[in-house]
């Protein structure tokens, strides 16, 4: 576990926590999304879609709150679960209740009171948390009387409809009644990190090791993680603390092999998480090597122009057969388009190299925000241009007049040139490699933007003894 790490920011006043719990298919995720006023948790009629805790912050009547969506509780506390996922889902729900300032116990008004509703209520009572019952699916006034069936649970009952937003204001008035009026102190914008990879590469295990707690359900069953799970995290203390928002995603398979709607939603969420991130950690299974699907995910990362680190997980399974140097050489041969990306060899199972991962994240974070001095940038490109000329196309040669950096995340370089159409892909890659040799920028994408500008080509700086190249 990295030293001085926590899964909550250290410099802010924490808002009250509202945990949404209940048995499966009562509408917990639908209510969670309704309270957030946006779609975050996957909602589907399939039982058991939500498994891990999904956490998000919002406000209600100007009161800041932290909402936690949980998986449906399907087992009783006095029985030994026959299914690992059921047991882990219950454990995640219990953790949410432990963290909660107040609990919303969601039930299905149309189904009436069930033994599992009573089990969830007993759990909340045992934890000593205040709660209210949201009797969901009271979609019109004729159903409001159905909410009375949940009085025996021992908490105030409110008939609501997450689908039609009925009774939500009254429910949240009761939920927030005891919340203090407080201002949330500002904190630095966190670095957004997405963990991506194919199913069973060990993404959740790796994240649990990185943050030092069993935050996510780990199972050998493919598709255990379904939602994109955001986890605030920081390393260090006080003004020097580094703040991160780490997103675990569902395993990404080729869409042509996906039949279930829930898995399709999960993959869409994973792709969206990649697009909104600053850095993506691509998790590979060392025992399998880079597969076609790993390369497809890498392509998504590259096309999104995101910082990237390749994490070779399960190194404990192969380290007795090869060295890291040999394995890296084979990786670079298999995925040459990732040679500018750092490769880290880890074992989530044994927990080694976590410190190196955090150091690599910080290093790449600096690189994606690098600001290149204009004079040195132009000198680097001029040296590259003089060393290797671009090819002739229809009797004319591509020429660069001037270069300047215009943005970061990604590092964006504007090239003012004679004709953008004459820049071949090979010469484009050559210029990128030249800049990487000069500036490093490990793990950081570089975007070249060409713009036509009719003027004299590169000229040496005053005092440069080298003679200007003649135009071709």
Image: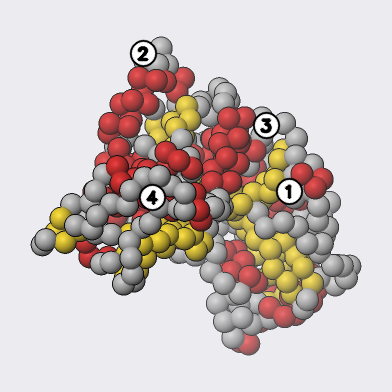
Above or below — where is 213 with respect to 188? above
Q: Which residue is mark 2?
A: 321
How packed mark 1 is, by other alpha carbons closer than 10 Å (few <14, some 14-19, many 20 or more), is some
Q: Secondary structure at mark 1?
A: loop
Mark 4 nearby-residue class (10 Å; few <14, some 14–19, many ≥20) = many
Q: Position of residue 434 (x, y in %)?
A: 37, 43
| Of pointers 2 and 3, the one earlier in the residue sequence | 3
Q: Secondary structure at mark 2?
A: loop
> Quadrant where the N terminus lies?
top right
Please report the residue visible at 37 percent of the width from the left and 26 percent of the height from the top: 328
Could you tell whether 349 is left or right of 329 in the image? right
- Which of the numbered marks, if any, corresponds to residue 381? 4
> Which badge, 1 or 2, comes first in the chain's sequence?
1
Mark 1 against mark 3, which lies toward the viewer?
A: 3
Residue beneath label 3, please?
Answer: 2
At a point 69% along the width and 63% down the height, the residue shown is: 57
Please give the label number shown on residue 461: none
Q: Is residue 249 left or right of residue 128?
A: left
């Amino acid at each position: 576990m990295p030293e001085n790490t926590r899964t909550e920011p250290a410099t802010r006043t924490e808002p009250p926590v509202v945990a949404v719990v209940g048995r499966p298919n009562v509408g917990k995720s639908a209510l969670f999304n309704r309270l957030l006023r946006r779609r975050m948790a996957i909602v589907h009629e399939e039982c058991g879609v939500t498994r891990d805790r999904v956490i998000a912050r919002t406000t209600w009547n100007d009161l800041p709150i932290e909402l936690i969506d949980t998986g449906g509780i399907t087992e009783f506390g006095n029985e030994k679960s026959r299914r690992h996922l059921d047991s882990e889902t219950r454990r995640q729900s219990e953790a949410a209740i432990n963290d909660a300032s107040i609990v919303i116990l969601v039930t299905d008004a149309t189904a009436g009171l069930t033994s599992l509703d009573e089990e969830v209520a007993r759990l909340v009572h045992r934890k000593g948390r205040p709660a209210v019952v949201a009797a969901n699916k009271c979609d019109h006034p004729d159903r409001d009387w159905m909410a009375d069936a949940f009085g025996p649970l021992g908490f105030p009952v409110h008939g609501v409809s997450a689908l039609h937003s009925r009774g939500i204001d009254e429910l949240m008035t009761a939920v927030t009644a005891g919340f203090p009026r407080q201002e949330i102190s500002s904190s630095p914008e966190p670095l957004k990190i997405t963990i991506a990879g194919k199913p069973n590469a060990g993404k959740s295990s790796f994240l649990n090791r990185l943050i030092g707690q069993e935050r996510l359900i780990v199972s050998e069953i493919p598709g255990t993680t379904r939602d994109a799970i955001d986890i605030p995290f920081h390393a260090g203390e006080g003004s020097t603390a580094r703040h991160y928002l780490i997103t675990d995603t569902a395993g990404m398979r080729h869409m042509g092999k996906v039949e279930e709607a829930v898995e399709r939603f999960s993959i869409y969420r994973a792709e969206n998480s990649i697009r909104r991130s600053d850095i993506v950690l691509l998790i590979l299974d060392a025992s399998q090597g880079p597969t076609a699907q790993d390369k497809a995910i890498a392509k998504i990362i590259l096309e999104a122009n995101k910082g990237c680190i390749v994490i070779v997980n399960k190194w404990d399974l192969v380290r007795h057969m090869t060295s890291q140097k040999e394995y890296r050489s084979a990786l670079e041969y298999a995925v040459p388009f990732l040679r500018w990306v750092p490769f880290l060899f880890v074992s989530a199972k044994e927990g080694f190299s976590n410190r190196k991962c955090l150091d690599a994240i910080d290093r790449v974070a600096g690189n994606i925000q690098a600001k290149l001095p204009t004079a040195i940038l132009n000198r680097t490109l001029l040296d590259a241009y003089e060393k290797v000329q671009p090819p002739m196309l229809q009797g004319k040669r591509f020429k660069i007049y001037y270069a300047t950096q215009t943005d970061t995340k990604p590092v964006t370089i504007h090239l003012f040139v004679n004709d953008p159409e004459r820049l071949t892909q090979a010469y484009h890659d050559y210029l990128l490699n030249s800049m990487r040799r000069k500036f490093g920028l490990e793990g950081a994408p570089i975007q070249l933007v060409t713009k036509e500008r009719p003027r004299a080509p590169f000229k040496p700086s005053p005092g440069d003894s080298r003679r200007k190249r003649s135009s071709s």
